[in-house]
Amino acid sequence: MFPCFLREPAATPERYQLWLGSSSSSGYAAAAAQPKQQKQKQQKQGKQQQKGGGGKASEEAVTPKSEDFSRWYLDVVAKAELADYGPVRGTMVIRPYGYAIWESIQAYLDRRFKETGHQNAYFPQLIPYSFITKEAEHVEGFAPELALVTKGGGKELEEPLVVRPTSETIINHMFAQWVQSYRDLPLLLNQWANVHRWEMRTRPFVRTLEFLWQEGHTAHATPEEAEAEALAMIQLYAEFATTQAAMPVVVGRKSKLESFAGANVTYTIEAMMGDKKALQAGTSHNLGTNFAVAFNTQFVDEQQQLRHVHQTSWGVSTRMIGGVIMTHGDDKGLRLPPNVAPYQVVIVPIVKKDTDRASVNEAVDKLTAALKQAGVRVKVDGNDMKTPGWRYNYWELKGVPLRIEVGPRDVEQGTCVMARRDMPGKEGKQMGVPMEASAFVATVQQALGQVQDSLLAAATAFRDANIVDVSSYEELKAAVAEGKWARGGWAGSDAQETQIKEETQATLRCFPFEQPAGPHTCFMTGQPAAEVAIFAKSY
């Protein structure tokens, strides 16, 4: 488990220490207690940044991943201006750059949902507490995380209201009114909303008291249709993770202990982060008739028989942003896949003499217009108060996939320089890129595709190298101790699954859809196993 991100020890520049300290006095005390030498160093860095010098200040602000992964992650979130802390402990403010990544995720998923026949709707955030208690497993699973409203308009409420932790209950309340006949089915809805879960240990984007997500809810006439829907949506999430976020995932089925409270079965996409921990990046649940029975959601079928509907729910949240950060980021900061990057290209004009300004700016304007016309998301950083080196480091920190450098000599030669974020140093630089519009756009588009593919390939290779096949509990413990994922035959009991969690902190992530050839033997019991399962520590 990770410590609450509002209480982690400060080891960053002074302003960031205050940021980590939230609104409490502890952050200010930590800043005041810094050694004098460290304060002087930070003041020097601040002056360098104000002058636009060097470009190293941004790099020094990010803790190396290998030194402290948790601190590195928080540094990147802060320094890349993705999020800040809200005044209520456990909440976060998503800054414009972070929200732009979420908008990229939204745009792709919203389009795919509509292509598959789903419609958007919105349901109230306040839910009667009695709704939550109607489904026994559901209330048991969510009770510790609920936020309750007990007063309104200065008066005690007759019934407490739950601030939405998820919407199965209130949506079923409405489905019961809307669905009367088989002709009303299937009912395919999606909601873009915020939810609240009273988490005790939080981490920006990965686990916060409030977060943004989409939640799909569908009702079907038959169990086969509901199962097909649940499987189709988890595959849609896998498609997004792979093709857009360049995040390789293992698609599979959760164990009963790890399934959603109130579901017959939960399907998941599991991604390996840069510290080898697993991240549950999206889930899809076959709810069967559990909520339909609780809320009496029934329909008359073609044989004039009254039946309960079969349902699914599925969701992806802003946790996906945390996944992108931890999958691709390096010691310089973010590395964003072009398909989800707010800016795919940043153009940096290099002007040393006023006499060169007009020609350089004219060339930059033409390149920018050509990229925009081709649908490329582009940003021009013409901030003369900062040196080119400072600006290079700034946009590397923010993970922009491609950087274009244009100076007076480039204008004279009709070429420019292109640098790839996924390839550091000279290896990632391409000189002599033609500035003629069509050739320039073609070069940029090809490079963006290469960056997207390169990030996916690197993440896939890293994941595959850190999955270990095990044939005994001792081998599993050894693999988990090394931070790796353990894969082996599983036919153990719920009690044995709990034992593994308590003794190793590893949980059963999933039974992968792609199973290795059998036969398999359970590493825990020595008995024949129908499937292999993956165990790993997780977020």
Image (tube, helix red, strand yellow):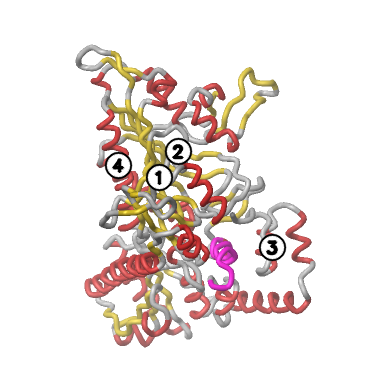
Above or below, 151 against 47 in this view is above
Q: How far separated are the C-alphas under marks 1 and 2?
A: 9 Å
Task: Say whether disc 2 or disc 3 marks the residue closer to the N-terminus.
Answer: 3
Please give the residue where the numbered disc 2 appears in the rendered image: 260
What residue is shown with label 3? Answer: 9
The mark closer to the camera, 2 or 3, is: 2
- Which one is closest to the eye, mark 1 or mark 2? 1
What crowding class fits label 4: few (fewer than 14 Cα within 10 Å), some (14-19), or many (20 or more)? some
Which element carries disc 2, helix, strand or loop?
loop
To which residue does mark 1 refer?
254
Give percent across and percent down for residue 165: 52, 36
The mark nearer the N terminus, 1 or 4, is 4
Q: Residue furthest top?
A: 304
Residue type at mark 2: give it. Phe
Give the number of the disc on residue 66.
none
Residue 21: quarter of image: bottom right
Determine whether label 4 and label 3 are within 8 Å by CB.
no
Real-space CA distance between mark 1 and mark 4, rounded to the nearest whole angstrom: 13 Å
